[in-house]
Amino acid sequence: MQELHEEEFERTDCLECANCCKTTGPLFTPKDIERIAKFFKMKQQQFIDTYLHLDEENDYVLQSVPCTFLGADNYCSIYEVRPKACREFPHTDRKKFQQISNLTLKNVAICPAAYNIVEAMKKNINL
Ligand code: SF4
Ligand code: SF4
């Protein structure tokens, strides 16, 4: 999977796509909130009140999608401090990849790179 992931992302230009940022938002962990609020020189609560809300699983998520930090040029305006979930998306290089197969099935519908990686994996194991 690691190899397939690396090969795919050598070909894929995320700046031509940004579908993940346009259609789903990341979870914001306490560390993400601390780091991004600091970047904006905001108090954490002020950052939360401005951009986030608690979802039904009690996780902080964006108030709306497309992500408010996504520019018209598909660049992320908080790239250096972006949430961990954004850095790791689409999670196809996870060591325990098989444990997140449900999440991957969801992500192939959003992410063309994840789709290609899963298709290549299926070919490799003759599915
Ligand atoms: S924070 Fe940046 S990388 Fe994450 S969804 Fe928003 S625009 Fe995309
Ligand atoms: S959806 Fe996939 S290919 Fe598109 S920008 Fe996100 S990670 Fe890159």
Image: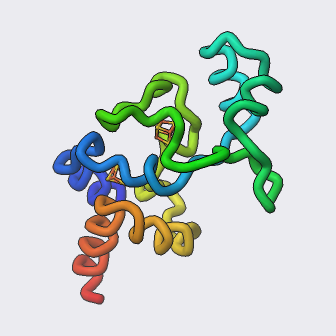
Comparing 58 with 52, the one in front is 52
Please, which residue is most extreme toward the left here? 11
Residue appearing at x 27%, y 40% in the figure = 15
| Above or below for 33 versus 91 | above
Instruction: Place residue 60 in its image quadrant.
Output: top right
Instruction: Place residue 70 in its image quadrant.
Output: top left
Residue 98 locus on image (x, y percent): 51, 70
Residue appearing at x 20%, y 46% in the figure = 10
Residue appearing at x 22%, y 49% in the figure = 12
The answer to whether 14 appears left or right of 79 in the picture is left
Residue 104 locus on image (x, y percent): 48, 68
| Above or below for 19 versus 50 | below
Residue appearing at x 32%, y 68% in the figure = 115
Comparing 100 with 75, the one in front is 75
The answer to whether 122 appears left or right of 24 in the picture is left
Please, which residue is most extreme toward the bottom here? 127
Q: Quadrant of the N terminus?
A: bottom left
Q: Quadrant of the C terminus?
A: bottom left
The answer to whether 55 appears left or right of 68 in the picture is right
The answer to whether 14 appears left or right of 87 in the picture is left
